[in-house]
């Protein structure tokens, strides 16, 4: 081996975490899981769990047997275990399971029970054999809690939780929980990296070669070692070759573990270009080896990247976006705010998205099609134009994006993208039409490039439920007019492209290949990185004013390919006529200046219908693709006013049976079943929803069938308020007396549950409507019982508001009794749908909304920051 030391040539970028072995430091076994006595089962409503002792990795172990019994929620094991934490540490435990892919959560809870730190691993792949799991300091995040300190310093309880993601039943077993102190992470990386080459043919070259210096040069089979000085954690490599001609096409990356064993962690099979971006999530090594297969190499720079480089695939693409020209990747990866709208059919199981720049996402969490245009050798993308968005037919959900010149005297191809969903629930498809026109007085040569990309329109900033950003494509094939993704035909073009290609990530992104003119011959690739991409290319010579069109069709709700001879223009006409029918049940007669308002109402109604999945009303299609009863009740009110009562009936017939056996109304329901999280507005919302449907339709038979749900919700609210209507509460804080218990129904109270007036105004609405339903059904005794409870609750609520405003010294109605916070959106429930304005303190009520208006005006005029 010939050592070649190059100071400053092989570079480390970013701060890296170092953790050499600590003399004398040993892992402390916290629990060997020999004895089940310290552990207790914790489970949500109607979820069952039991502890069972088994043989473990070392001695005994404990298993949690759980059954979700058709509802959402969790089951776990918890024990008291006070711990103090060093600055840097590592938990370890052994795990095996026979379980569906539910979430695995490791929780550390403080003595108050309010502050929780955790490691949350969604859709966990439970190993069948005992496997060691390790969590370092950086893996443990603040889950929730009112303490502003985000650093875990001490805890009182430890918990292993299985949270419903796939549902069903299973067993998960635990053994050997240990805590190991680690040395502090150093602030900076070392100044140099030692490099060794396997033959004397390799040499260091310090001359400047063009714009990029050459640090290491070799030919033939080589093994280049980068010695990091001590064991380190890192997130990947960026290799800069002196030029694209002197780089290997094939090579492997190997890491050396603490025992001196080498393992291959990444292979490059079709390397291309002068830079290689290699994601190595959670990598750890003292030495890195590049095993080169042959050829001539000139390496200018090797940058060892910090952990955040590949913490998530989105982080990797964000790092890449910082180097590529703006517009080559969607704007969300560059930190810009992207906007989008939905497309779908009434009640379909899937919805697509159309981005403001013209990209189309074909299903939730799926890949996208993004347009580019080559004009006279110039690549034009969204950053080179000014995209303009519109909806046709006064608000129909068939969005159009048109590229116009970005500035005065600018030049842009006249591209129009229009997209819609054609068909009906169970058999629908996305249709994306691309019309390119030559706006110039001379003929022009164009290439319309439709890129199939492993990226969603839903941006990477979206993290709840459906994480936006990357949508992996492991295999891509374009065969004539058919695009197959991961082995399934997914997209059909109405005319075959003039040329098509597919490219693995290591050979360059689709747009890189197009911009450089390096069009690959391959139209099918496999890519283990999950970042395959490709393009359909339409080469058109257009006369002045001439326009050509191609459409892409993709199954949305179902798997059916479009029929032969599918006509996109006719499908657009049929879809527009269908939406005119669905949205035309109620006519708004307004003066001419009100047309935009009428169109907005029509679009809102369309989005209510598109967002629902079958009978399931939901507030969104990505992050909020669950059915929340609060949203369902308010969406129902809009549907009833706009002439769609049958949709509301379908929703209530679907949602009401998910009520828990004790009468509790779940805050939300999805494919996993009823959610157990206590949100105490839910009970009143279901009762209001049922009563509102009856008020609009007079459907007494339906009301009779819903009565058990109304009575169950009422009785559950009675038990809740009785738990707070105690002398202890009257003495401790009269603002809590007789109220609904604390909950997190308000986003502002997610850190710690509060006595929310939002909950209580909804509860009062539910009490009132329960009385009305009982009266409508002729249930006199029930009506009297409920009316007495309603009146008592209203009196307690009025007293609570007086006590809270006095306690906090405020001149407005608060959002929560504990906080005295200013939250007029909570107070609006008292007005609509509550109808309680006649007894609310008028001065406080007027002050609340006057202050709200003044703050809005100040924000609008730039005199107040929006973060307030």
Image (cartoon, rainbow, N blue to C red):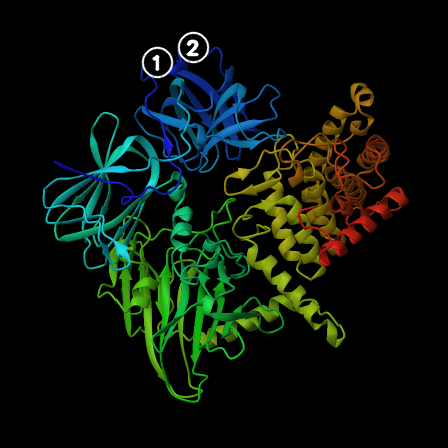
Residue 745 is situated, as x and y percent measured from the top left of the image, at 66, 38
Residue 357 is situated, as x and y percent measured from the top left of the image, at 49, 65
Query: Residue extending furthest front?
Result: 207
Task: Please tell me whether residue 209 is drawn above or below residue 175 in the rendered image.
Answer: below
Q: Which of marks 1 and 2 is nearer the N terminus?
A: 1
Which residue occupies 39% across, 11% down? Answer: 34
**Are the residues tagged 1 and 2 within 8 Å (C-beta)?**
no
Q: Which of 636 and 239 is in front in this view?
A: 239
In screen coordinates, is 95 left or right of 421?
Answer: left
Task: Please tell me whether residue 41 is drawn above or below residue 389 in the rendered image.
Answer: above
As drawn, the label of residue 558 is none
Residue 612 is situated, as x and y percent measured from the top left of the image, at 56, 54
Q: Which of 587 and 426 is in front in this view?
A: 587
Q: Nearer the viewer, residue 347 or 121?
A: 121
Q: Mark 2 points at which residue?
A: 35
Q: Name the residue under label 1.
A: 24
Task: Report the mark closest to the observer, 1 or 2.
Answer: 1
In screen coordinates, is 289 left or right of 630?
Answer: left
Mark 2, residues whose alpha carbon is within 10 Å: few (<14), some, or many (≥20)? Answer: few
Q: How many labels does the image show?
A: 2
Task: Please tell me whether residue 292 is drawn above or below residue 718 in the rendered image.
Answer: below
Secondary structure beneath disc 1?
loop
Residue 520 is situated, as x and y percent measured from the top left of the image, at 24, 65
Secondary structure beneath disc 2?
loop
The answer to whether residue 267 shows anywhere in this view is yes
């Amino acid at each position: 081996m010939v050592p070649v030391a190059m100071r400053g040539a092989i570079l480390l970028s970013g701060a890296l975490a170092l953790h050499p072995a600590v003399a004398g430091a040993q892992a402390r076994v916290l629990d060997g899981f020999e004895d089940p006595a310290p552990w207790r089962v914790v489970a949500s409503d109607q979820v069952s769990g039991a502890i069972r002792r088994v043989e473990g990795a070392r001695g005994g172990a404990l298993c949690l047997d759980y059954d979700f019994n058709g509802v959402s929620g969790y089951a776990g094991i918890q024990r008291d275990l006070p711990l103090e934490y060093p600055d840097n540490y590592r938990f370890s435990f052994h795990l095996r399971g026979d379980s569906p892919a539910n979430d695995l959560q490791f929780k550390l809870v403080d003595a108050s029970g309010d502050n929780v730190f955790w490691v949350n691993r969604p859709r966990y792949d439970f190993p069948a054999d005992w496997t060691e799991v390790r969590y370092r300091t950086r893996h443990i995040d603040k889950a929730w809690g009112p303490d502003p300190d985000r650093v875990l310093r001490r805890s009182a309880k430890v918990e292993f939780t299985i949270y419903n993601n796939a549902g069903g039943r299973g067993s998960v077993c635990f053994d050997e929980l240990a805590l190991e102190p680690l040395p502090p992470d150093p602030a900076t990386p070392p100044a140099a990296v030692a490099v060794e080459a396997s033959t004397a043919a390799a040499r260091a070259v310090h001359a400047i070669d063009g714009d990029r210096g050459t640090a290491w040069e070799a030919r033939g089979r080589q093994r280049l070692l980068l010695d990091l000085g001590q064991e380190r954690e890192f997130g990947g490599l960026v290799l800069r070759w002196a030029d694209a001609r002197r780089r290997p096409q094939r090579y492997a990356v190997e890491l050396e573990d603490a025992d001196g064993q080498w393992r291959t962690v990444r292979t490059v099979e079709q390397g291309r270009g002068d830079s290689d971006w290699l994601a190595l999530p959670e990598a750890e090594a003292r030495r890195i080896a590049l095993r080169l297969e042959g050829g001539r190499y000139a390496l200018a720079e090797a940058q060892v990247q910090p952990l955040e480089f590949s913490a998530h695939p989105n982080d990797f693409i964000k790092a890449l976006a910082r180097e590529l020209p703006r517009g080559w990747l969607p704007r969300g990866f560059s930190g810009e705010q992207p906007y989008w709208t939905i497309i779908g059919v009434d009640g379909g199981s899937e919805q697509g998205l159309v981005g403001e720049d013209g990209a189309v996402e074909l299903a939730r969490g799926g890949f996208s099609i993004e347009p580019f245009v080559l004009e006279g050798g110039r690549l034009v993308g969204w950053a080179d134009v000014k995209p303009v968005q519109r909806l046709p037919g006064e608000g129909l959900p068939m969005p159009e994006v048109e590229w116009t010149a970005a500035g005065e005297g600018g030049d842009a191809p006249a591209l129009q993208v229009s997209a819609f969903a054609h068909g009906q629930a169970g058999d629908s498809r996305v249709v994306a039409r691309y019309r390119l026109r030559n706006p110039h007085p001379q003929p022009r040569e164009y290439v319309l490039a439709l890129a199939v990309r492993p990226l969603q329109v839903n941006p990477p900033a979206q993290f709840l439920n459906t994480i936006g950003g990357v949508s992996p494509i492991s295999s891509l094939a374009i065969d004539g007019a058919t695009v197959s993704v991961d082995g399934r035909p997914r997209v059909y073009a109405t005319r075959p492209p003039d040329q098509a290609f597919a490219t693995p990530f290591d050979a360059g992104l689709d747009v890189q290949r197009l911009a450089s003119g390096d069009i690959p011959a391959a139209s099918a690739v496999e890519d283990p990185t999950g970042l395959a991409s490709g393009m359909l290319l339409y080469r058109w010579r257009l006369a002045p004013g001439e326009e050509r069109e191609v459409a892409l069709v993709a199954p949305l709700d179902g798997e059916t390919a479009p029929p032969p001879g599918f006509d996109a223009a006719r499908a657009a006409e049929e879809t527009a006529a269908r939406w005119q029918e669905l949205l035309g049940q109620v006519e708004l007669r307004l003066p001419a200046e009100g047309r935009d308002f009428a169109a907005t109402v029509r679009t809102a109604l369309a989005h209510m219908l598109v967002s629902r999945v079958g009978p399931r009303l939901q507030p969104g299609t990505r992050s909020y693709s669950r059915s929340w009863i609060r949203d369902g009740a308010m969406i129902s009110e809009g549907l009833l006013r706009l002439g769609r009562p049958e949709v509301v009936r379908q929703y209530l017939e679907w949602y009401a049976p998910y009520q828990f056996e004790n009468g509790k109304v779940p805050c939300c329901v999805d494919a996993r079943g009823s959610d157990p999280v206590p949100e105490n507005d839910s009970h009143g919302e279901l009762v209001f929803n049922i009563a509102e449907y009856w008020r609009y339709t007079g459907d007494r038979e339906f009301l009779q069938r819903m009565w058990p749900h109304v009575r169950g919700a009422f009785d559950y609210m009675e038990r809740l308020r009785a738990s707070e209507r105690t002398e202890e509460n009257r003495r401790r804080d009269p603002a809590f007396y007789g109220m609904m218990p604390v909950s997190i129904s308000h986003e502002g109270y997610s850190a710690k549950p509060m006595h929310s007036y939002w909950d209580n105004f909804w509860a009062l609405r539910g009490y009132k409507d329960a009385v009305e339903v009982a009266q409508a059904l002729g249930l006199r005794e029930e009506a009297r019982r409920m009316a007495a409870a309603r009146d008592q609750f209203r009196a307690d609520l009025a007293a609570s508001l007086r006590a809270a405003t006095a306690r906090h010294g405020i001149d407005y109605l608060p959002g929560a009794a504990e906080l005295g916070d200013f939250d007029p959106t909570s107070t609006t429930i008292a007005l609509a749908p509550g109808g309680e304005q006649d007894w609310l303190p008028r001065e406080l009520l007027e002050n609340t909304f006057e202050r709200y208006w003044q703050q809005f005006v100040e924000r609008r005029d730039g005199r107040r920051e929006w973060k307030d």
